[in-house]
Image (spheres, grey):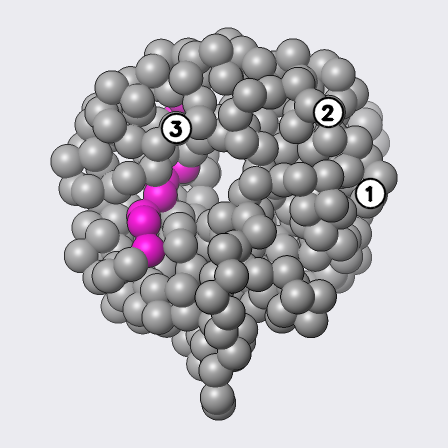
Amino acid sequence: MTTATTNASPAFRLTDSTLRDGSHAVHHQFTAGQVRSVVVALDKAGVPVIEVTHGDGLGGSSFNYGFSGTREMDLISVAVETAERARIAVLMVPGIGLKDHLREVAEKGVQIARIATHCTEADVTQQHIGLTKELGMEAVGFLMLAHKLSPEDLLEQARKMQDYGADCVYVVDSAGALTISEAKRRVATLKAGLDVEVGIHAHNNLSLAVANSLGALEEGVDQIDGCSVGLGAGAGNCPTEVLVAVCDRQDIPTGVDTFSVIDAAETVVRPLQPTQGVIDRDGLLLGYAGVYGSFLHHVKAAASRYDVSSSDIILELGRRGMVGGQEDMIIDVALQLKSGGA
């Protein structure tokens, strides 16, 4: 396929999270060869930032979150060694990841650390954002399940991350629950109230990931996440190649070669045959009920094991307001549904 390029300065910085959020969709079984192939393809297309870790971030390989098929540090090393232009980023959730993980990835040449936490708990990121800056990396604050707070309350949490040293703070729609107006209000409020950059990470459970990203761009968002073929938790993420193509159609410069990134999705990532990335009943209900997308595999496993409806589990998790890190409660909900107690 021929190429479509532009020399205009990008309107935003694109971070592709296929090799982190997409890890959920392949049960954290990425191989070194697959990481190398994806990085080569995205790097060639001009994607400026590529994120690599276990789906739940550094240290996520565990009984609670799912064991990695290959050590994430080995995958990160492959990514750093392979990328010629792209900067490699990692995600870290304090408590799942440790400070030593940050020190180790800094030594490997990782340039960006995204410090993630539930949107009401920015306080727990102070030490890790501080260490990220001490290690010479760019620090990004990642406020997950952002639909659970009003824009004003989200700004209060974002200001804490800014004060800790974050270079950018993200509105993270972990459940794919935000409508377009809700996403725009959050981005606009953070843009008006922060002195650092603002980003958006959108999931596609309500089929709004691209629309929400474009709406955020109208409000001046500085960084946008995508995943090739939408590979990610829940019903998947904002598809990188679709976002780039739509921007191209609207003369919004991305700095990414449209046809190369489409080729990367079709020939490199789609053959991985993910089990997620489609808006089926459970994927849609995650967004409808505002439930953490990373719960999906755990919900399906519990539904099968205890012979209860996965949809009923998702709706009950939504009613209880469960957040990331409470994966063990999924079994409790399944057992209570089984006994008729939920």
What residue is disc 3 on? 139
Specify the quadrant that holds the C terminus.
Answer: top right
Q: Amino acid at mark 1?
A: Thr
Residue furthest out toward the bottom: 1
Separation of disc 2 and disc 3 at Cα?
21 Å
Residue in the picture at 52% in, 78% down: 4
Q: Quadrant of residue 319?
A: top right
Question: Reading the chain from its start, which is encountered first: label 3 or label 1?
Answer: 3
Q: Is residue 238 found inside the magenta-colored segment of the image?
A: no
Question: Reading the chain from its start, which is encountered first: label 2 or label 3?
Answer: 3
User: In this image, 155 relative to 169: left or right?
Assistant: right
In the image, the segment drawn in magenta is: 86-96
Percent x, y for residue 125? 44, 16
Disc number at residue 179?
Answer: 1
Above or below 191: residue 14? below
**Label 2 SS:** helix
Question: For the residues carrying marks 3 and 1, which lies nearer the camera in this image?
Answer: 3
**Label 1 SS:** loop
**Label 3 SS:** strand
Question: Reading the chain from its start, which is encountered first: label 2 or label 1?
Answer: 1
Q: Amino acid at mark 2?
A: Thr
What residue is disc 2 on? 189
Question: For the residues carrying marks 2 and 3, which lies nearer the camera in this image?
Answer: 2
Q: Amino acid at mark 3?
A: Ala
Above or below 223: residue 127? above
Percent x, y for residue 142? 52, 30
Above or below 91: residue 7? below
User: In this image, 303 relative to 253: left or right?
Assistant: right
Q: Nearer the viewer, residue 15 or 217?
A: 217
Question: For the residues carrying marks 2 and 1, which lies nearer the camera in this image?
Answer: 2
Separation of disc 2 and disc 1 at Cα?
16 Å
Percent x, y for residue 47? 42, 60
